[in-house]
Each structure stands twice: as C-alpha cells, then as structure tokens.
Image (cartoon, grey):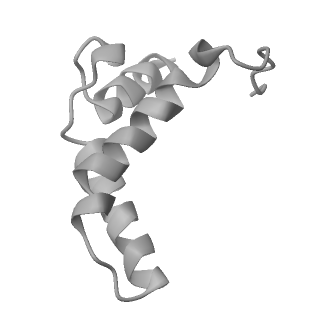
C-alpha cells in the first residue's frame, strides 16, 4: 500500500477518511459519555465492527456494505 501524496489543500485524497470520521463522531462519539479511555476504545471498536462495516450502506461503495465489498474481492482469489 502506498500513501497519498496530494498537494496541501486538495480534499479528494482524504474524502473517504473524512466521511468515516464524520460518521463516527456524529453517529456514536458525540452521543455518548465515556467514563474511561478504555470504555471509549471498546465502544468505538464495537461500532466499527458491529455496525459501520457490517450493516451501514455506503454511497462510495455503490450502496453496499464494506464487509460485502471486502469479501467480494476475496472470492476470486479463494476460488483460484
């Protein structure tokens, strides 16, 4: 994997990451009060693995779930 090397101020390089963090903050973090850092970490991981990747549909993925897209890329490699 190679990191993006876009110019400063070019927003298209990190649009997917910005979208993810926006959703994470708006749908989970800003609605929850965490007593400890470890509780916050567990909750964020649970949100990503339990909802964001498995049930939430994404416009950038043609309204498919991230897990479905991930496994569809792995299928041809496993069949070979």
Relative placement, left or right, of 47 versus 45 is left
**Quadrant of residue 30 within the rendered picture:** bottom left
Identify which residue, 66 or 22, lies in the foreground.
22
Identify which residue, 20 or 74, lies in the foreground.
20
**Quadrant of residue 75 within the rendered picture:** top left
Relative placement, left or right, of 11 versus 39 is right
Considering only vertical position in the picture, is 64 above or below 31?
Answer: above
Considering only vertical position in the picture, is 36 above or below 17?
Answer: below
Relative placement, left or right, of 72 versus 33 is right
**Looking at the picture, how far across and down is residue 78, in whole percent?**
47, 26
**Looking at the picture, how far across and down is residue 42, in whole percent?**
38, 74
Q: How many marks?
A: 0
Please report the residue visible at 36 percent of the width from the left and 21 percent of the height from the top.
72
**Quadrant of residue 61 within the rendered picture:** top left
**Looking at the picture, how far across and down is residue 57, in whole percent?**
21, 28
Location of the N terminus by quadrant is top right
Please report the residue visible at 35 percent of the width from the left and 88 percent of the height from the top.
35
**Looking at the picture, how far across and down is residue 31, in whole percent?**
22, 62
Identify which residue, 23 or 69, lies in the foreground.
23
Please report the residue visible at 28 percent of the width from the left and 24 percent of the height from the top.
58
Check the image and name the residue furthest to the front.
Answer: 9
């Amino acid at each position: 994997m190679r990191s993006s090397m876009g110019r400063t101020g070019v927003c298209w390089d990190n649009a997917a990451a910005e979208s993810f963090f926006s959703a994470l903050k708006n749908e989970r973090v800003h609605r929850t009060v965490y007593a400890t850092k470890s509780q916050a970490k567990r909750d964020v991981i649970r949100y990503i693995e339990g909802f964001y990747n498995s049930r939430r549909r994404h416009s950038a993925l043609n309204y498919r779930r991230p897990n479905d897209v991930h496994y569809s890329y792995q299928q041809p490699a496993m069949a070979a």
